[in-house]
C-alpha cells in the first residue's frame, strides 16, 4: 500500500500539501504505536487516537519525536489541546466533531485538519472546514463501527461529489489499495493495513 499511495497524484489546486498515506492508531488493534510510526515512509502521517488514555501526552510526545526524525506528520485524534501541547502537525476529527474543523484551522492555519465521514452528505459537511475527509468503509473492515462497505465504484462517486480531498479508509491494505487507484482520491488511510 505504501508504494500504491506514492503513485497517487495530489489534486490540482489543493490549498495544502496533504500526505498520500495516513496510518491511524487504535487502542485495541495497534499493539505498538511507536513501531508503527517508525515504519512509516517519509511524507506519510500518523493519526494518534488516544481515546482518553491516561498516558496520552507521554505517548504523543514519544510519537512526535519519532515522526519528526522520520519526516512523518503527526495528527492527534479528537484532542486539539493535546495536539497543541505536543506541537503536532494537526488533528483528525470524528464525524460528530467535524463542524469544529473551520475554527481549528482559523486558530492554527498551519495545521492539517481532517474529519471522518460515512456518507456523501457528511463528506460535504466535513469539507466545509476540514482540509480532507476520511470516507469509510471503503471495503469490509475489522472496525466495530464499520457499516456496509462502499466498494470502489460508490467510493469514486462519493469522491466526485464531496467537493474536496477524500481519503479511503476501511479495509484498505496492499491488495485493496491497488483497486482504488485512479478514483480521484488524495490518499489512503488504514488501521490494520499498515501494521508493522
Image (tube, rainbow, N blue to C red):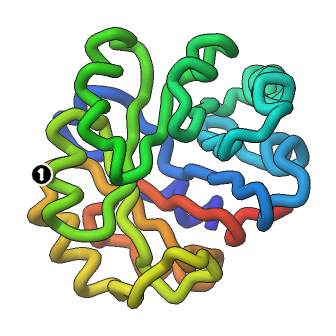
Q: Quadrant of the C terminus?
A: bottom right
The mark tally for this picture is 1
What's the residue at 57%, 50% (across, down)? 22
Q: Secondary structure at mark 1?
A: loop
What's the residue at 24%, 38% (across, down)? 99
Q: Nearer the viewer, residue 57 or 54?
A: 54
Q: Nearer the viewer, residue 186 or 139?
A: 139
What's the residue at 59%, 78% (across, down)? 144
Rendering coords of residue 62 (x, y %): 86, 26
Q: Quadrant of residue 147?
A: bottom left
Q: Nearer the viewer, residue 79 or 76?
A: 79
- Residue 15 lies left or right of residue 38; in this view the side is left
What's the residue at 24%, 75% (across, down)? 156
* Label 1 sits on residue: 163
For the residue carrying disc 1, how many other residues have a C-alpha within 10 Å: few (<14), some (14-19), or many (20+)? some
Q: Quadrant of the N terminus?
A: bottom right
Q: Quadrant of residue 152?
A: bottom left
Amino acid at each position: 500500500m505504501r508504494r500504491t499511495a506514492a503513485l497517487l497524484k495530489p489534486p490540482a489546486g489543493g490549498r495544502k500539501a496533504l500526505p498520500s498515506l495516513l496510518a491511524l492508531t487504535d487502542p485495541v488493534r495497534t499493539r505498538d504505536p511507536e513501531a508503527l510510526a517508525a515504519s512509516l515512509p517519509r511524507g506519510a502521517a500518523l493519526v494518534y487516537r488516544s481515546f482518553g488514555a491516561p498516558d496520552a501526552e507521554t505517548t504523543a510526545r514519544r510519537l512526535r519525536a519519532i515522526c519528526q526524525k522520520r519526516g512523518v506528520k503527526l495528527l492527534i485524534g479528537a484532542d486539539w489541546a493535546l495536539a497543541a501541547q505536543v506541537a503536532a502537525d494537526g488533528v483528525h476529527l470524528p464525524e460528530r466533531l467535524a463542524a469544529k474543523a473551520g475554527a481549528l484551522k482559523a486558530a492554527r492555519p498551519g495545521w492539517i485538519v481532517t474529519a471522518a465521514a460515512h456518507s456523501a452528505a457528511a463528506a460535504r459537511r466535513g469539507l466545509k472546514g476540514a482540509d480532507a475527509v476520511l470516507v469509510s468503509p471503503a471495503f469490509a473492515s475489522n472496525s466495530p463501527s464499520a457499516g456496509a462497505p462502499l466498494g470502489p465504484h460508490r467510493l469514486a462517486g462519493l469522491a466526485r461529489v464531496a467537493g474536496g480531498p477524500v481519503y479511503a479508509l476501511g479495509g484498505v491494505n496492499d491488495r485493496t489499495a491497488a483497486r482504488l487507484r485512479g478514483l480521484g482520491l488524495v490518499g489512503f488511510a488504514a488501521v490494520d493495513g499498515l501494521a508493522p
